[in-house]
Amino acid sequence: MSVKVAVVYYSATGNVHQLAQAVAEGAEKSGAEVRLRRVPELAPDAAIDGNPAWRAHVDATSDSIEVATLEDLEWADAYALGSPTRYGNIAAQLKQYIDTTGGLWQRGVFADKPATAFTSAHNVHGGNESTLLALYNTFHHWGSVIVSPGFTDPSVYAAGGNPYGTAHPGANGAPEENVLQAARYQGERLTKIAKRLQGIATD
């Protein structure tokens, strides 16, 4: 018996996408069945075309990563949400998806399920922590069990020491292995807690 983890994210130029893949890898390594899903792009083509990296990522993932639906959330036993930072807050694309979950929330679909978050801002202090806390505000309203990485593994320290969730400063380029390892650990920890909550943990 395995737990089911939904990794749902928005990524413009690909950094959060790479974090999402790493979180999914960590969850799968711990025995979870994983759905990796992206939310729809809302930005106009004129904005996307103004940034070659943005256009490249949109084109690269348009067919390779499925678009998230509400059914993915209903299916899952645990959640990992990822968003780049926009003025210290969640990107509109992910927020729009979250804002459609009212029906699931009213039915108690999210209650008592573990949830975690990850992000990427341009700079180390460009809003990473506030974006994670904003995502956790959603989990509070959902009645979910917040599973932050804390300082529970050396990989957290190696990735910059963010106890709220994996965060990558995009100005440094693509996430390096130390950051991806922290994201994998976050997926592993989420799965472990999900198993414990379901009474199927083996450790």
Image (cartoon, grey):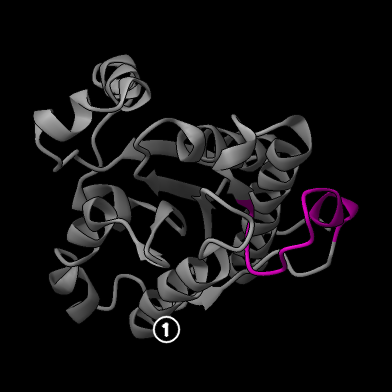
x, y percentage for residue 133?
Answer: 50, 75
Residue 46 drawn above or below residue 3: above
| Rendered position, 148 above or below 153 | below
Q: Single out the residue that lies furthest toward the right.
A: 154
Q: Quadrant of residue 31?
A: top right
The residue lying toward the viewer, choosing from 52 and 108, is: 52
SS for dot 1: helix
- Classify 10 Å Cα crowding around label 1: few (below 14), some (14-19), many (20 and above): some
Q: Which residue is mark 1?
A: 140
Amino acid marked by disc 1 = His
On screen, residue 72 versus residue 203, left or right, reads: left
The front one of 117 and 83 is 83
Figure disc tally: 1
- Give residue 105's position: percent from left, percent from top: 23, 76
- Residue 45 is drawn in which quadrant? top left
Query: Residue 161 in magenta?
Result: yes
- Report the residue at 40% width, 31% height from top: 13
Which residue sits at x=17%, y=67%? 99
Report x, y in % for residue 71.
22, 50
- Give the residue drawn at x 51%, y 65%: 127
Residues rendered magenta in the picture: 153-167
Quadrant for the C terminus in the image? bottom right
**Left or right: where 22 falls relative to 152:** left
> Which sits in the foreground, 108 or 133?
133
Residue 184 at what x, y percent from top left? 69, 41
For residue 107: magenta? no
149 relative to 87 in the view: left or right? right
Q: Could you tell me what secondary structure mostly forms the magenta stretch?
A: loop
